Image (spheres, rainbow, N blue to C red):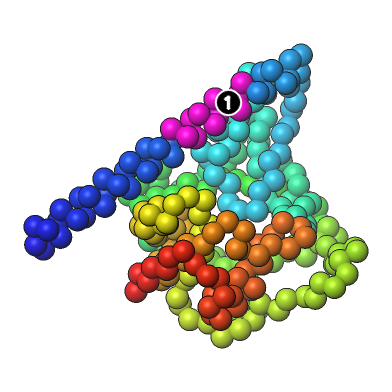
Amino acid sequence: MREDEGGGDEREEGRIGRMRGRMREDLREDEGRMRGRMREGARGLDLSRVRACVVVAEERPRMSLTHSFSKLFKDLGLHPRSVSTAFGCRVNLAICLQGTSGPDPTTVYVDMRALRHDRVRLVERGSPHSLPLMESGKILPGVRIIIANPETKGPLGDSHLGEIWVHSAHNGSGYYSGYGEDVLHAVFPWTNLLVVVVELEGSEQEALDLVPMVTKAVLEEHYLIVGVVVVTDIGVIPINSRGEKQRMHLRDGFLQDQLDPIYVAYNM
C-alpha cells in the first residue's frame, strides 16, 4: 500500500469517527429532552404497579434497546424486570403477544460466522464473534410454528437457519377497506447482489460519508455484504397506507432507474 493510500484510509476512518461522535451526541441530547418532556407531562403518573410491559417488535429483540426503554421509564417507577419483548407486526399483531417464560428473559449466544452460512451454533458468553439472542415471548396455546426453507417449503432440521412460519387463529386473512390494493407476489428471479437505499436529509457531501457507514453497519448488525448503496432525498422510498415500506416498488424503481438518487456507490 502506498503512503497516500494509507493516508486516505486514515482520513476516511477519521471522518466516520467524527460522524459517529456527532450521532452519539445527538442521541444523548434526544434522550435527555425526551426524559425532560416525560417528567413534565407525566407528573403524578406511577408505573410501579405495572407487572408486565410487553414491547412488540418486528425484528429480533435488541438488548440495548430494551435497556434504553427501561431506563427511559425508570423515573416513572417502571421496574426493568417487568419489561419484555414479543414478536409481532402491523398485520398480525397477536402472533406472539405473551410475555417471556420468567422475570428474566433467556439469553443465548450464537456464532456470527455460522449465521453467515445459515447455521445456528451456540457459544459461550464472551466468545469471539458471538451474538446475543434474547427470548421474544412464548408461543400461545393453539399456535403451530415451524422453521421452514422458503425454497422447498419444507421444515428444516435443528441448527438450520430459515423462515418462521406461523399457523394460528390470530393470523390475519385480509384487510378491510383496502380498496384498490392488489396483493404483491414477491417471487422473482434474483441475484446475490444486495442493494440498500438510504434517505438523506442533508448536504450531498454527507452522502459520500454515509456509504462506508451503511456498509459497515449492515455487515456488523445483519452479517450481509452490501453490493450497492443508493442515497436519495427524503420521501423517495414508497410506503403503503399502513406505513410499511414497499420494497417491491422500490426494487422496480431502482432497476428502471427512476429513483433519481443523490449518489450511488458500487461496492462490488
The quarter of the picture where the N terminus appears is: bottom left
Magenta extent: 25-36
Residue 72 in the image: state x and y as whole percent.
60, 27
Secondary structure beneath dot 1 equals: helix
Instruction: Work out which residue is located at the far top of the displayed protein and give it.
Output: 44
Asked if one can make out residue 56 in the rendered structure from this viewpoint, the answer is yes
Give the camera-side residue of 36 and 216. Answer: 36
Q: Quadrant of residue 185?
A: bottom right
Q: Relative to 141, is 119 above or below?
A: below
Q: Quadrant of residue 224?
A: bottom left
Q: Is residue 31 magenta?
A: yes
Asked if one can make out residue 110 in the rendered structure from this viewpoint, the answer is no
Residue at left offset 66%, top offset 18%: 39
Residue 139 in the image: state x and y as whole percent.
72, 52
**Circle 1 residue:** 33
Residue at left offset 58%, top offset 51%: 60
Residue 34 in the image: state x and y as whole percent.
61, 28
Q: Is residue 8 left or right of residue 118?
A: left
Q: Is the stretch drawn in magenta largely helix, strand or loop?
A: helix
Q: How many marks?
A: 1
Q: Is residue 41 left or right of residue 170?
A: left
Give the camera-side residue of 44 and 80. Answer: 44
Q: Is residue 184 left or right of residue 136?
A: right
Q: Is residue 32 left or right of residue 145?
A: left
Give the camera-side residue of 18 and 160. Answer: 18
The quarter of the picture where the C terminus appears is: bottom left
Q: Relative to 106, is 115 above or below?
A: below
Instruction: Classify mark 1: residues with Cα within 10 Å, few (<14), some (14-19) or many (20+).
Output: few
Q: Is residue 212 magenta?
A: no
